[in-house]
Image (cartoon, rainbow, N blue to C red):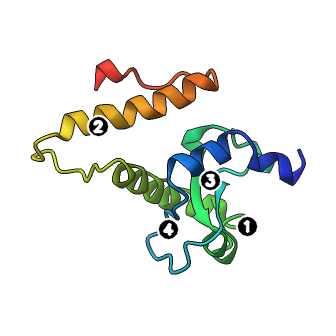
Amino acid sequence: MRKDDRRSGRSITYVNLMNFSCAHPECVSGLNVEGHHIIPLSRGGPDAFWNIISLCKSCHRGKKLHSRWEKSDIELYTYKCDHELRRFGFFLDEKEPDFRDKLKKAVLVCHNEDRKQNTPLVNPDEV
């Protein structure tokens, strides 16, 4: 697979859904956001939404994520989860009045995007 092919489809859709914002909590740049496959495609990682995080070019390249991906995968999944939840206004506070509605909205958005790509996801009625 050519490098340019990795930036098509799901990566672009995901970065767009995340409003072109960097998920790394220590980001100081936030410019030129791109999709990063947490488990690299070259190492057999899938081109699936659960494996993509949006990172600015500085965080993506500067933190050596490709060469040490096996050591940073849990850290990146944690950043990804927090970023996605915050993007949809969901801050892990079950006491928030519209907690379940926000959770359902986030699941539905992801579910609809994955259905376009023919990938099964969580049933929003199970939330």
| Crowding near the residue tagged with mark 3, few <14, some 14–19, many ≥20 C-alpha atoms within 10 Å | many
Element type at marker 4?
loop
> Could you say which disc has been placed on residue 10 in the image?
none
Nearest-to-viewer mark from 1 and 3:
3
How far apart are the two marked residues, 1 and 3, measured between alpha carbons? 11 Å
Q: Using residue 11 as the reference point, say whether residue 109 is left or right of it.
A: left
How far apart are the two marked residues, 4 and 1, measured between alpha carbons? 17 Å
| Crowding near the residue tagged with mark 2, few <14, some 14–19, many ≥20 C-alpha atoms within 10 Å | some
In this view, the residue in front, 106 or 36, is 106
Q: Earlier in the sequence, mark 3 or mark 2?
A: 3
How far apart are the two marked residues, 3 and 2, measured between alpha carbons? 24 Å
Query: What's the residue at 30%, 31% (across, down)?
Result: 104
Please determine whether, in this image, residue 117 is positioned above or below residue 70.
above
How far apart are the two marked residues, 2 and 1, measured between alpha carbons? 34 Å
Amino acid type, mark 4: His
In this view, the residue in front, 19 or 71, is 19
Q: Using residue 21 as the reference point, say whether residue 118 is left or right of it.
A: right
Residue that mark 3 sits on: 38
Residue that mark 1 sits on: 67
Amino acid type, mark 2: Leu
How far apart are the two marked residues, 3 and 4, measured between alpha carbons? 13 Å
Element type at marker 2?
helix
Amino acid type, mark 3: Ile
Nearest-to-viewer mark from 2 and 1:
2
Residue that mark 2 sits on: 103
Nearest-to-viewer mark from 4 and 1:
4
> Could you say which disc has been placed on residue 24 in the image?
4
| Crowding near the residue tagged with mark 4, few <14, some 14–19, many ≥20 C-alpha atoms within 10 Å | many
Amino acid type, mark 1: Ser
Nearest-to-viewer mark from 3 and 4:
4
